[in-house]
Amino acid sequence: MTTKSLRVLVLTCSTRPGALGPAVGGWLTDTLAPVAKELDVDLVPLAVGDLDLPFLDEEEHPATGVHRHEHTRRWSRIVAEADGFVFVTPEYNYGMPATLKNALDYLGPEWAWKPAGFVSYGHTSAGTRAVQHAKQVVTTLRLVPLGSTVAIRITDAMRDDRFTPDARHAEAAEGLLAELVRVAHALTPMREPRHADAMPGPLPGSYVRPLGPDDAAEVTVLQRCCWLEEALVNDTLGIPALHETLEDVRAWLAEWDVTGLWRDGRLLGMVRTRRDGDDLHVGRLAVVPDLRGLGVGRWLLALAESAAEGCRRVLLTTGAASHRNLAVYQRQGYAVLPDPRDDGAVDLGKVVTP
Ligand SMILES: Cc1cc2nc3c(=O)[nH]c(=O)nc-3n(C[C@H](O)[C@H](O)[C@H](O)COP(=O)(O)O)c2cc1C
């Protein structure tokens, strides 16, 4: 769950002396500045010529991520940090310029699952054949080309030797940026970095990984949603999971061993454990409401119990009126502990068999 601005690279692709490209790129960034602000987009103008990229001179395939040259490493950082791209491209001989193809070829995973918009210019075709050519190439890199385009016929846009496109081009450019933002957000789950410590989860496409303080926003949402039912059946709002702040959650995420179950960027469930002498405390076992009854909770509980090696007991707590939870825990071998609590909750324990 991110609240940072989207970073959109506006890449001017022509490099020849006296090229029209810089004027097109300048018009585009000036035109889009107000709407970019409204859409919380950082537009980053850049010219391919300023990257000093020779014809691809890396030994390894770009998919390996092994970049030997400093110019490649710099280009890799720029592309990796971007959330989307607008390519400002001329049409050369019915295709994209070699400069754009070369800049694309340099990298691999850095481009993946990010939207690509095109602003083209040329003579009768307004650069559209270059865009069609580029679209065919960028999909191989898992860039996602937008349907919206801005295609400018040079003769329509030149007034007194100045590049001055009319209002419909500005409108088209704004529409392109708006579409780019929507697609960039929709693709965010596809871009979620693969965590080295992720393991397959119990549902197709799901995985588990340790949660830390950076996951506090998702955890706060999940626990408020899940413990609302507990509040209703136990007729109390005095449940910590319901009123913990983001900072509280951040703090316990740093102290407990917490595992989260994810799919497509959504936190589906979690459980936390902490050893205390001979006991393993298990808590915050939660599964999103729409995936209950599929055995996900039991799977997470078994995962938590796998940390009990060397412990005498596994302990957990639930509401005294949470009959569904109590039944699940009792089926898994837990028994209600004799010592009563005075907060409407019950403690359960299970002896660990060595
Ligand atoms: C090598 C080359 C090939 C070109 N091929 C085409 C073409 O296929 N279609 C077209 O509409 N214009 C073509 N043009 C004309 C360009 O659209 C026009 O020169 C434009 O200004 C090029 O962009 P630039 O000034 O940013 O390099 C070509 C220009 C060059 C230099």
Image (cartoon, rainbow, N blue to C red):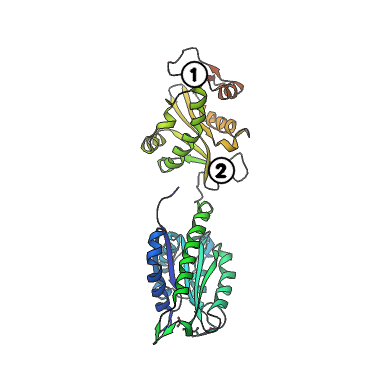
Observer-side mark, 2 or 1, equals: 1
Residue ID for mark 1? 346
Residue furthest to the bottom? 160
| Foreground of the two, 109 or 148 | 148
Tell me which corner region of the image, top left, top right, bottom left or bottom right, holds residue 136. bottom right
Question: The C terminus is located in which quarter?
Answer: top right
> Which one is earlier in the sequence, the residue at label 2 or at label 1?
2
Determine if residue 315 is in view: no
Q: Is mark 2 within 8 Å of ligand 1?
A: no
Image coordinates for residue 27, horizontal then vertical, percent: 40, 74
Is 3 left, or right, of 114 in this rendering?
left
Image coordinates for residue 105, horizontal then vertical, percent: 52, 69
* Residue 272 sits above or below residue 60 on the image: above
Is 46 left, or right, of 222 in this rendering?
left
* Residue 234 sits above or below residue 187 on the image: above
The number of callouts visible is: 2
Determine if residue 322 is in view: yes
For residue 207, the mark is: 2
Q: Judge the density around disc 1: few (<14), some (14-19), many (≥20) Cα neighbours within 10 Å.
A: many
Which amino acid type is marked by label 2? Tyr
Tell me which corner region of the image, top left, top right, bottom left or bottom right, holds residue 50. bottom left
Q: CA distance from mark 2 to mark 1?
A: 31 Å
Which amino acid type is marked by label 1? Val
Image coordinates for residue 338, horizontal then vertical, percent: 50, 12
Image coordinates for residue 69, horizontal then vertical, percent: 43, 67
SS under mark 2: strand
Tell me which corner region of the image, top left, top right, bottom left or bottom right, holds residue 47. bottom left
Is 267 left, or right, of 293 in this rendering?
left
Q: Judge the density around disc 2: few (<14), some (14-19), many (≥20) Cα neighbours within 10 Å.
A: many
Residue furthest to the front? 167
